[in-house]
Image (cartoon, rainbow, N blue to C red):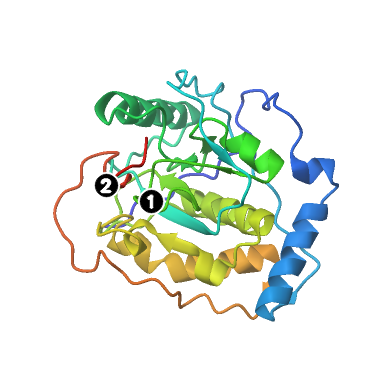
Amino acid sequence: MSDALPPSPSPEPSDPPPADRPSRRRLLGGAVTLGGAALLAGATGLQSSASAATRPYISTRAQWQARAPRSTATILSRVPDHIVVHHTATANSTDYSVNHAYALSRSIQNYHMDSNGWSDVGQQFTISRGGYLMEGRNRSIYALDTRTHVVGAQCAGHNEHTVGIECEGLYTSATPPSALFSTLVRLCAFLCDLYAIPPSSGIVGHRNYVATACPGDTFYSMLPRLRQEVAAEMGLVGADATEHPLPDLGRGLRGPQRAFDHGPALARGERG
C-alpha cells in the first residue's frame, strides 16, 4: 500500500534562517549556477536553458540541536563527483512536522556516534518524509559555501569523492512521499550544478557502490526519474538519465535492515 502524501513543507521552517556566512552562490550573484550549467552542457553536449538550480533551504545543525562532534570533519579542496542516495531504513512515519524532522537528525547522530563510534553524523544531508532538508555532518554547509568537499562516513571506500543524502523511511516496497522526493530533486540539482556533476551518471544509489539493499528496491527503481527531474530542474535539455555506468550490487538482496545502519559505510582504514 502506498503511503499517504504529506503536505509540502514551507520553503523555510518556522525557525529563523541560518546565521552562517553567505553562500558562494549569493556572493557571486548566481555565477556559480550559470557557470555550472554551462560547464555541464559543454562537457556532455547537452543544451542548457536559461533556468538554473537554486539552493534549497537547509536547516543548520544548530537548528536541530546537534551534539558537538568528537572531531572537526575533514575538508578537501577538490569537489565530489557523485551523489549517493540512501534510505534510513526507519519506520515510514506519518509525522511530517519540522519537529519530527529535527528529532530524526538527532536520532541519526546519536546512533552514528554512540552505536557506531563515529565522530559525528555519517551523511552530509538528511531529508525527512515531510520534505525538510537538514545539514548532517559538521561543515557540510561550509563545504557548499566554499565549493569544497567535506568527507563523510556513508559509503565504504567512496567517502572522499561522494556526497551522501539520507532519506527518511524504508523503501523496499513503499514509495517515498512526494514532499521528500521534491526536496531531493532540488538538493541534487543544486549539488550537480555547484559541483558540475552530470545527473545522468553522477546520481547513484548506495547499492551501486556496496552490496546493500539501500535505498530499497522501490526507491532504487525511481533513480532514473530522479535523474530526469534533476536535469530538468537544472535546465539541461536532452539528458539521458536512464543509464549509468555502475552495477546494481544489491540486486536480489533481501532481509531486514537495522535503522540507520543499512550497509557498509566505512572501509578498512577509513574513519567515521
Residue 216 x/y as whole percent: 29, 58
Mark 1 in CB contact with mark 2 (< 8 angstroms) = yes
Residue located 29% across and 23% down the image: 114
Label 2 neighbour load within 10 Å: few <14, some 14-19, many 20+: many
The residue at the point 64 percent across, 56 percent down is 195
Query: Residue 86: which disc?
Result: 1
Picture quarter containing residue 119?
top left
Q: Nearer the viewer, residue 100 or 19?
A: 19
The image quadrant that residue 93 belongs to is: top left
> Which residue corresponds to mark 2?
262
Between disc 1 and disc 2, whose residue precedes? 1
Q: At numbered mark 2, what does the secondary structure look like: helix, strand or loop?
A: loop
Q: Residue at x 49, y 19 (%)?
A: 65
Q: Which quadrant would the C terminus be assigned to in this image?
A: top left
CA gap, disc 1 to disc 2?
8 Å
**Which secondary structure, mark 1?**
strand
Q: Position of residue 212 (x, y in %)?
A: 25, 56
Compare residues 4 and 185 and report the one nearer the observer.
185
Q: Residue 161's x, y, as percent?
A: 50, 53
Quarter the N terminus occupies: bottom left
Q: Position of residue 25 (x, y in %)?
A: 77, 46
Mark 1 nearby-residue class (10 Å; few <14, some 14–19, many ≥20) = many
Residue extending farthest to the right is: 29
Q: Amino acid at mark 2?
A: His
With respect to residue 141, does 264 lie above or below? below
**Residue farthest to the front, as pictured:** 269
Q: Quadrant of residue 31?
A: bottom right
Q: Please tell me whether residue 225 is drawn above or below residue 99 in the rendered image.
A: below
Depth check, front residue: 250 or 63: 250
Q: Is residue 235 above or below residue 140?
A: below
Examine the rendered structure and indicate whether residue 4 appears above or below residue 52: above
Kind of residue at disc 1? His
